[in-house]
Amino acid sequence: MSVPDAPPPAAAGGSANRASNWNVPNLITVVRILLAPVFIWMLLADGGTDGPLRWTAAVLFVIAIATDGVDGAIARRNNLVTDLGKLLDPIADKVLTGGALVSLSILGELPWWVTIVILVREIGITVYRFVVIRQGVIAASRGGKIKTIVQSVAISFALFPLWTIFGDWIFWVNGILMTAAVILTVVTGFDYLWQAYRGRRAKRAGA
C-alpha cells in the first residue's frame, strides 16, 4: 500500500517509521503478489480457448489488482503506512500487470512491442527505486497511480473474452484502452525521471 505523494526522492517520515511492517495492509500486498502466479497459470493453461479457466483468471486478476486500493485505504485510515509497504505496493502491481501482459503476448493476443515498452518502463523505475533506497523509499506519484489504473482497466478488458458475448467490435475497445495505457506509461516514465533529476539538483543545491 502506498499513498499518493510527490515523486522522488522523498524520505519516509513520521508514521512510516512508527508503524510495524507486519500489518494488515502489507499482508494484503504480499497476498496480491502470491496470487500472480496462480492467475498466470490459469490464463496460460486455458491456452486461448476462452473457457472457464480464462474467465476465472480474469476475475482473479481484477480481485487481486483491486486490493491495491483496499490496502492503501486501510493503511491511511489506521496510520499504518510503512516504507516496506511503499516499496512492495508498486512491485505487486508490476508483477500482476507484467505477468498479464507477457501471458497475453505468449497467447498471441497482444503485440510483443507493447509488452516490452511497458515492461522496460516498469522494470527501469523499479530498479531505480532500489538504487536510491538509502536516500528514502520513493512512494508512487499521482501520475503513476493513474497510469496503473488505466493499465489495469486495459488489461482487464483484454483478459475477459468479451468478444464471445459482444462480438469482434470489442477488440476496438481493447485497442483504444491499451493505447491509452502505453501512452500514459511512457509519459509518466519520462516525467518520473525528470522529477528525479530536479530532486537531485535541488538536494545538491541545498547542501
Image: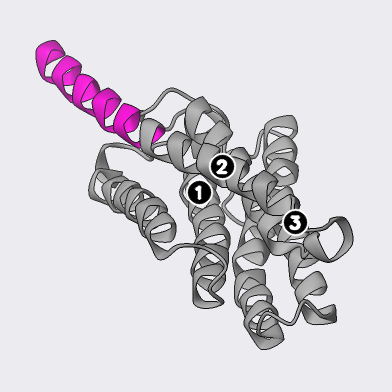
Circles 2 and 1: CB distance less than 8 Å? yes
Could you tell me which secondary element the residue under label 2 belongs to?
helix
Give the labeled residue for mark 2: 148
The answer to if 202 sits in the magenta stretch is yes
Residue at horizontal 62 percent and vertical 40 percent from the top = 149
Residue 159 falls in image quadrant: bottom right
Residue 10 falls in image quadrant: top left
Residue 14 sits above or below residue 51 on the image: above
Q: Using the image as rendered, state which of residue 18 and residue 39 is in the foreground.
A: 39
Identified by mark 1, the residue type is: Pro
Residue 144 sits above or below residue 102 on the image: above
- Say the numbered circle drawn on residue 62: 3
The answer to if 140 sits in the magenta stretch is no
Could you tell me which secondary element the residue under label 1 belongs to?
helix
| Alpha carbons under labels 1 and 3: distance apart | 16 Å
Q: Using the image as rendered, state which of residue 73 and residue 92 is in the foreground.
A: 92
Could you tell me which secondary element the residue under label 3 belongs to?
helix
Horizontal relation, residue 92 to residue 153: left or right: left
Identified by mark 3, the residue type is: Val
Give the percent coordinates (x, y) of residue 172: 66, 47
Give the percent coordinates (x, y) of residue 179: 51, 42
| Alpha carbons under labels 2 and 3: distance apart | 13 Å
Give the labeled residue for mark 1: 90
Q: Nearer the viewer, mark 1 or mark 3?
A: 3
Write down the region rendered in magenta. 188-207
